[in-house]
Image (spheres, rainbow, N blue to C red):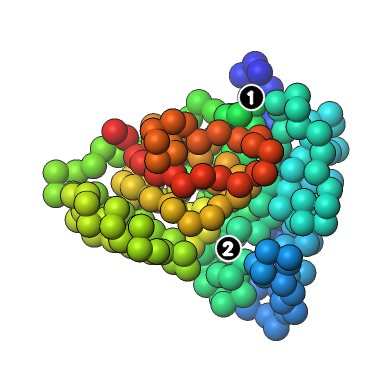
Amino acid sequence: MIESERIKLAELARRLAVEAGDKIMPLYRQDIAVQQKPDASPVTEADELADEYIVAGLMQGAPGIPVVSEESVAQGRLPDISGGLFWLVDPLDGTKEFISGSNEFTVNIALIENGTPVLGALHAPALDDCYLTDGSTAFLIKRDGSKTQISARAVPPEGAVVVASRHHRDAQTDTFIAEHHTASVTSAGSALKFGLLARGAADIYPRFGRTMEWDTAAGHAVLSAAGGSVRRTDGNPLEYGKSSLDNPHFIARGQE
């Protein structure tokens, strides 16, 4: 894909992520109904509203590129992605955070090309932070339009800042932390953990629990552009477009 096309599609992803965030914020910290999906994960009106808006926007703005979104897949709609180019969308990542009133939820949109996330927007509506990459550079953009280039850092001499899942930290994660030179451990919800690594506020994010491709793709794209990496525990890159859309365990890192 040529650079000008990537830039155009990255801006489309950013715009739709921000606009979807604007649509769900009126429901934030309100008494909204919560339903359970077949996998026992929660879903709300906000998830469905953002999903519908983003999918429609991507189909209009980039016709011909299939869209795989969490809520659409939950409803049994999975397009043909055998061509290797497709969107991955999580319209509300961190639904539990949203329900609880935490500000750690995001809207995630990424473009996958031949198994690799080549651009992505990771927007945190309640924090007014939008992480964006067109595949070459990573930025943090605020609502006023201010745009700051960000980069991951090398692990400092005093040890790594490890960021772990707020709701899914397990014994394997604790073992990993104990076996590494760790300065501190912080917890965060949703894909914001990738943003912390991308801007140099943390160094390692180990994930041994279950995730889906739409959970990680946008953050993966941003972190890669910022100089970091996302690899399976065997050292191979985390890839996308798998038949099940499940991710294996992975380790996300800043600069190595």
For disc 2, the marked residue is 94
**Residue reaching furthest left?**
157
Residue 35 can be seen, yes or no: yes
Quadrant containing the N terminus in the rendered view: top right
Q: What element carries label 1?
A: loop
Residue 12, quarter of picture: top right
Q: What residue type is labelled 2?
A: Gly
Q: Is mark 2 on a helix, strand or loop?
A: loop
Query: Residue 232 vs residue 115: left or right?
Result: left
Q: Which percent across, then down, holds residue 92?
A: 65, 59
Pointer 2: residues within 10 angstroms few (<14), some, or many (20+)? Answer: many
Which residue is at the front of the view, 45 or 83? 83
**Residue reaching furthest bottom?**
31
For disc 1, the marked residue is 114
Mark in front: 1 vs 2: 1
Q: What residue type is labelled 1?
A: Asn
Decide: is 27 above or below 191: below
Q: Residue at x 39, y 33 (%)?
A: 235
